[in-house]
Image: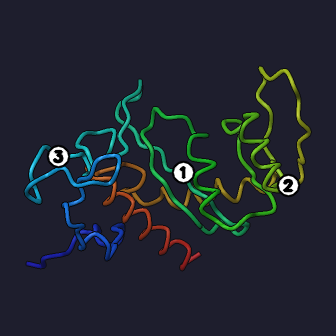
Amino acid sequence: MYHLQSLHPLGQKRCLAAYFYPGCGGRTDSRGACARQLKREGAPLGVRWKRGEFNQAVGVSRGGRTTKIHCLADGRGRIVAVALTPGNMADITMAMPMLEALAPAKRLIADKAYDADRLRTWLQDKGIDAVIPVRAARAIAYPLNRAAYRRRNVIERMFGRLKNGKRIATRYDRLAINYLAAIALVATITQWLG
């Protein structure tokens, strides 16, 4: 029988600094002084990932256990950045951290879930045009570039192609890093074929 490797290495971040330890084993007080007699003495400081569903991007809501996939795509629908959050977290929480990690774009096309004053002012400060429709309950109505907003279907089609893979549409992986690796693999294949 074939012994297939997991997709885990695709989603793993490797860092050479993880293999080097400071003289005190990484445990110092606020002044940077080592307060231990032996290298590994004392309680753990919580530098490892915590266990639990929340840290594996699994949220519990009325629909059950869910995970949200946040993607940034270019104008041709190619995925540029991906992040996972629990399903009960707001969509807008990942917008600014993901945009900060990339080179500045001309415009951001998003749906009503991203309609917030904080995000709009942040985008304006960065020189990015916000193409986001306003929510019905909003007091201040912002103008919407409808011609640019029609391009949002590129992102919707990208998610449709991504979720054609059953493993992505229905999350089977317990670990978020394995699920992220599966998303990377399916995204690579769909972008290569399409």
Q: Give the labeled residue for mark 1.
A: 70
Camera-near label (3 vs 2) is: 3
- The quadrant of the rendering that contains the C terminus is bottom right
**Where is residue 85 drawn, in percent x and y?**
45, 44
Mark-to-mark CA distance, 2 and 1: 21 Å
15 on left or right of 131: left
SS type, badge 2: helix
Q: Nearer the viewer, mark 2 or mark 1?
A: 1
> Which residue is drawn at the image coordinates 57% and 40% (left, top)?
93
Q: Of the residues under marks 2 and 1, which one precedes in the sequence? A: 1
Tell me residue 123's x, y (percent): 77, 49
Task: Using the numbered discs, state the Cα–Cα distance from disc 1 to disc 3 in whole angstroms.
Answer: 32 Å
Q: Residues within 10 Å of mark 3 (few under 14, many from 20)?
A: few
Q: Amino acid at mark 2?
A: Ala
Q: In 3D space, how far apart are the residues under numbered discs 3 and 2 (Cα atoms)?
A: 51 Å
Question: Is disc 1 placed on a helix, strand or loop?
Answer: strand
Q: Amino acid at mark 1?
A: His
Q: Is residue 126 left or right of residue 141?
A: left
Tell me: residue 109, above or below residue 193.
Answer: above
Residue at 28%, 67% in the rendered image:
8
Q: Which residue is mark 2?
A: 148
- In the structure shown, which secondary structural element does the residue marked by tag 3 occupy? loop
Which circle marks residue 44 in the picture? 3
- Marked residue nearer the N-terminal end (3 or 2): 3
Q: Nearer the viewer, residue 47 or 170?
A: 47
Would you say the residues marked 3 and 2 are in contact, meaning their CB atoms lie under 8 Å apart? no
Q: Is residue 48 above or below residue 78?
A: above
Q: Quadrant of the N terminus?
A: bottom left
Q: Nearer the viewer, residue 161 or 181?
A: 181
Question: Which amino acid does the dot numbered 3 rest on?
Answer: Pro
At 19% from the left and 61% from the top, the residue drawn is 25
